[in-house]
């Protein structure tokens, strides 16, 4: 992309409405525009990152054997009356009437709808196990929408649902989700720690939240610092293996790590004192096993091996896709702006032309742009007639991991400058060598 043809409305001043750094930087980098409280339009740069995050989520869900689908955002109130949640959900639910005076709602989550789909089409245990998921907009009329996309009212969520014949099978699905989530967050350059949590309105005894440690997090958490040494890394996992998935769950959840809702002082005190930590965290996901709660109230049964109708065991599993942008920025920035992890960066590399209009510099930039594109990289070329300082500031603000600076002086010696956004280190090298380094 050439910056002169792109839409990147960066702000020079700090917007006064932003209380935390990620919100401030998303506004300044021209990624989002608020349309009303907690509701945002995704401008091209923000949209690009949102889609990158979504695509990692899809990739890891499909790897785990889960099936993508898409449910409607609008739901009928009747389904929620069946589960009993129409009244329970309270004011967070956006209730709407259509022209025939029928009660509708904008989905805050989809347990009811997926259970309805399941009961309409699945009648035998032979069709199990089944896990389907979607990435779809949700609406929750939060009392206090704030921190930009972190606590929006309209937000993008991955929600997945498993249907199993037995509790044992459903717990395998739970473990599969835990593993796939660990991989997902790590690919985004994030450490998200699974912590024992509370069921809340979805209900259920088994649940873990995934938390990214950050001072601006809204959750209070308590943990054994040894959990922060755990990484999933590039190990291979067979998602069909009950033992392997269970093993990962045990490894990642055996140390003390809880949110304030489930925190137990006495247990915490058994952790060696030097490893006891209390901190703030951002909830970027949550997994639940809730048994037959919805299948019983909504009649989602299958014929079991014994020929008898059996309510299915279910769980639901969510990732805050749009919240993740905020969480990633909270964990990756400096005074000059965002520092995108390679896995989610909107463009791989910025090209800064120090002297737009100079024949040699323009030609070198064009060649670099072509070479990168041919190599499968997605560069952002700042071809505007601006002074160098302004171009550098924009590149630092939007946080591309690499910048190649091209100017007439360097070109006389056959070199351009390659700079790492994260380390700030630069090296001079031939243009082809710079491209080769990025591939
Ligand atoms: P919170 O405790 O932050 O209100 P939640 O527990 O109500 O979140 P879940 O029902 O577990 O949320 O939804 C799954 C994921 O969706 C959450 O882990 C979070 O990352 C994301 N999420 C929930 N509410 C919002 C929101 N208002 N804005 C953006 N993301 C959200
Ligand atoms: Mg909530
Ligand atoms: Mg929560
Ligand atoms: Mg939650």
Image (cartoon, rainbow, N blue to C red):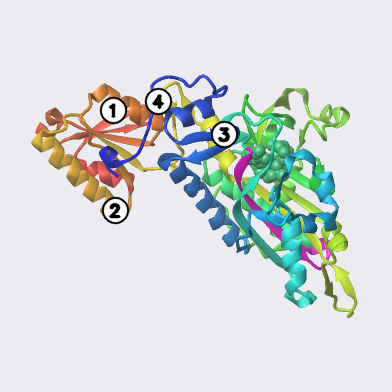
> Which residue is label 2 attached to?
375
Label 3 to label 1: alpha-carbon separation? 31 Å
Label 1 to label 4: alpha-carbon separation? 13 Å
Which residue appears at 63% of the width and 36% of the height? 229
> Which residue is label 3 attached to?
36
**Mark 3 vs mark 4: in front:** 3
- The reply to whether dot 2 and dot 3 touch (C-beta < 8 Å) is no
Q: Secondary structure at mark 3?
A: strand
Residue 114 location in percent, x, y? Answer: 72, 61
Q: Secondary structure at mark 1?
A: helix
Which residue appears at 87% of the width and 62% of the height? 296
Given residues 169 and 325, the one toward you in this image is 325
First along the sequence among labels 3 and 4? 4
Given residues 321 and 28, the one toward you in this image is 28
Which residue appears at 79% of the width and 76% of the height? 123
Q: Residues within 10 Å of mark 1 (few under 14, many from 20)?
A: many
Label 1 beta carbon less than 8 Å to ligand 1: no
Region rendered in magenta: 153-169
**Mark 1 vs mark 4: in front:** 4
Q: Residues within 10 Å of mark 2 (few under 14, many from 20)?
A: few
What is the number of the mark on residue 391?
Answer: 1
Residue 363 visible here: yes
């Amino acid at each position: 992309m050439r910056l002169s043809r792109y839409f990147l409305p960066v702000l020079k001043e700090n917007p006064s409405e932003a209380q935390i750094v990620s919100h401030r930087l998303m506004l300044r980098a021209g990624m989002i525009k608020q349309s009303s409280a907690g509701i945002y339009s995704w401008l091209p740069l923000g949209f690009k990152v949102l889609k990158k995050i979504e695509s990692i989520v899809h990739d890891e869900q499909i790897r785990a054997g889960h099936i993508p689908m898409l449910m409607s955002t609008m739901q009928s109130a009747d389904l929620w009356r069946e589960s009993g949640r129409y009244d329970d959900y309270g004011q967070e639910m956006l209730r709407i009437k259509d022209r025939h005076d029928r009660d509708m709602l904008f989905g805050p989550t989809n347990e009811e709808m997926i259970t309805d789909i399941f009961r309409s089409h699945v009648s035998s245990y032979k069709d199990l196990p089944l896990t389907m998921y979607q990435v779809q907009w949700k609406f929750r009329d939060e009392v206090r929408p704030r921190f930009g996309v972190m606590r929006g009212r309209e937000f993008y969520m991955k929600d997945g649902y498993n249907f199993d014949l037995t509790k044992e099978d459903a717990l395998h699905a739970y473990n599969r989700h835990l593993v796939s989530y660990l991989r997902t967050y790590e690919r985004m350059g994030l450490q998200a720690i699974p912590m024992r949590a509370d069921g809340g309105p979805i209900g259920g005894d088994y649940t873990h939240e995934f938390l990214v440690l950050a001072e601006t997090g809204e959750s209070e958490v308590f943990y054994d610092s040894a959990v922060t040494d755990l990484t999933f890394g590039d190990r291979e996992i067979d998602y069909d293996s009950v033992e392997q998935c269970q093993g990962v769950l045990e490894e990642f959840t055996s140390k003390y790590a809880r949110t304030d809702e489930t925190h137990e002082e006495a247990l915490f005190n058994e952790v060696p004192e030097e490893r006891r930590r209390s901190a703030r965290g951002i909830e970027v996901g949550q997994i639940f096993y809730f048994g037959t709660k919805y299948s019983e109230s909504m009649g989602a049964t299958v014929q079991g091996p014994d020929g008898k109708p059996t309510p299915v065991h279910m769980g639901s599993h969510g990732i805050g896709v749009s919240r993740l942008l905020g969480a990633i920025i909270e964990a990756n920035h400096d005074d000059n702006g965002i520092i995108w992890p390679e896995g989610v960066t909107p463009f791989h590399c910025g090209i800064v032309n120090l002297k737009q209009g100079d024949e040699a510099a323009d030609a070198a930039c064009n060649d670099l742009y072509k070479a990168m594109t041919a190599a499968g990289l997605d560069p952002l070329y700042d071809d505007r007639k601006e002074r160098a300082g302004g171009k550098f500031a924009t590149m630092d603000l939007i946080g591309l991991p690499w910048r190649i600076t091209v100017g007439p002086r360097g070109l006389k010696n056959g070199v351009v400058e390659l700079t790492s956004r994260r380390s700030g280190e630069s090296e001079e090298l031939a243009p082809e060598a710079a491209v080769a380094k990025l591939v």
